[in-house]
Image (cartoon, grey):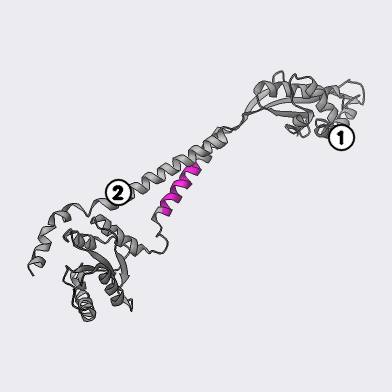
Amino acid sequence: MTATATRPVAAAKVTATRPSGRRGDGFRQTVALSVLVGLVAGALVLFVVGMRNPLYEGRVGLIASPVSEQSGSAAQYGEVVSLVLPALVELARSPSVLAEATSRVPDGPTPAELGANISVELVPASGLARLSVRAPSAEAAGALVFALAGAIIDADLLQPVSTLRLLDDRADLTRVAPDWPLVIGLALGAAAAAGVATAVLRNLPRSGRSAEDDAVRAALESAGLRPAAVLRGDDPRLVDRLQMLCAAAARPAKALAVVPELADRAESLNRELAAKADGTAEADPAVIAVARRGRGPQDELTATVGVLPENTVLVAVVLT
């Protein structure tokens, strides 16, 4: 009886400092880990996509002009241009034109490589075509697009009533890859998705455990105690399980209610456990905390077990 009267006093210091910090630490750890994973994911996307070889596009225009102003030539010019100019798309990719274009650029690509990086855009009802060539450098893109345009002009596709001529004196050069606004957007999206996924996974109940179990374990951790078995009050074999735990601890059982409303349930458990005990154990009792069920923070449990003496053994928490 004397030991029982002194226990609450001996650990009163613990209660004032333990309950507040650990859940906040867990939240901060989740935030820090989510931010770290997000930064790593964003940096990885930036590295993989942003470090690709640069690609430039050179564009020039070709326009069809009539050869003469003789009577009837205007009608022939319109017919020829409308019928023949669409063939410019295929002419630009013909082996002879590609070979001629690559021969005009020292250290240029092969005809097959050039053919895979060109595009031809026809402007309807205008006699205008736009040639585009992509290359690893701006200088190469400009040189290749002019070489391709020259080879097409030399092919005299629209003779004898029309001819093609360059519309631009300088190529319009644009860097097309990597597209930095797109890369940055992808990196930010990947970082946000990775961070959110990490936070969600960190807050999911672990395999084989419920949110109630996690709340109990968080309460015990906040009180500075090791994890204990979490049992349900409606378990038909509850008393047998508690008896086995107390036998493993070599101590008699003592159920302790964490709130006054559960005092009757704790006394009922004490009577049932005492009825099955052999009455030989003389060590200090092993504590069984009786708490309310719920997924929220178990502050009452933290406060109750936090005032137990340091040598107290908590074997189980019964949720009822």
| Residue 82 visible in this rendered orientation of the protein | yes
Choose top left, top right, bottom left or bottom right for residue 203. bottom left
Residue 138 within the magenta-colored segment of the rendering:
no
In the orientation shown, which residue stands out farthest toward the left?
A: 2
From the image, state whether disc 1 or disc 2 is nearer to you.
Answer: 2
Q: Residue 172 carries which label?
A: none
Q: Residue sitting at 85 percent across and 22 percent down?
A: 154
Q: Residue sitting at 26 percent across and 59 percent down?
A: 220
Please tell me whether residue 70 is drawn above or below residue 86 in the rendered image: above
Residue 4 falls left or right of residue 214: left
Please tell me whether residue 22 is drawn above or below residue 104 in the rendered image: below
Q: How far apart are marks 1 and 2 (CA)?
A: 75 Å
Q: Quadrant of the N terminus?
A: bottom left
Total tally of numbered discs in the picture:
2
Q: How crowded is the residue under tag 2: few (<14 C-alpha within 10 Å), some, or many (20+)?
A: few
In the orientation shown, which residue stands out farthest toward the bottom?
A: 275
Q: Position of residue 152 (x, y in %)?
A: 82, 25
Choose top left, top right, bottom left or bottom right for residue 90. top right
Element type where label 2 sits in the image: helix
Which residue matches tag 2? 25
Q: Position of residue 278 (x, y in %)?
A: 21, 79
Which residue matches tag 1? 83
Q: How crowded is the residue under tag 1: few (<14 C-alpha within 10 Å), some, or many (20+)?
A: few
Which kind of residue does numbered mark 2 sit on? Asp
Q: Label the magenta part by its dominant secondary structure.
A: helix
* Front residue (pair 131, 21): 21
The region drawn magenta spans 188-201
Looking at marks 1 and 2 on the same chain, the residue that comes earlier in the sequence is marked by 2
Asked if marks 1 and 2 touch (Cβ < 8 Å), the reply is: no
Choose top left, top right, bottom left or bottom right for residue 136. top right
Which kind of residue does numbered mark 1 sit on? Leu
Q: Position of residue 189 (x, y in %)?
A: 50, 43
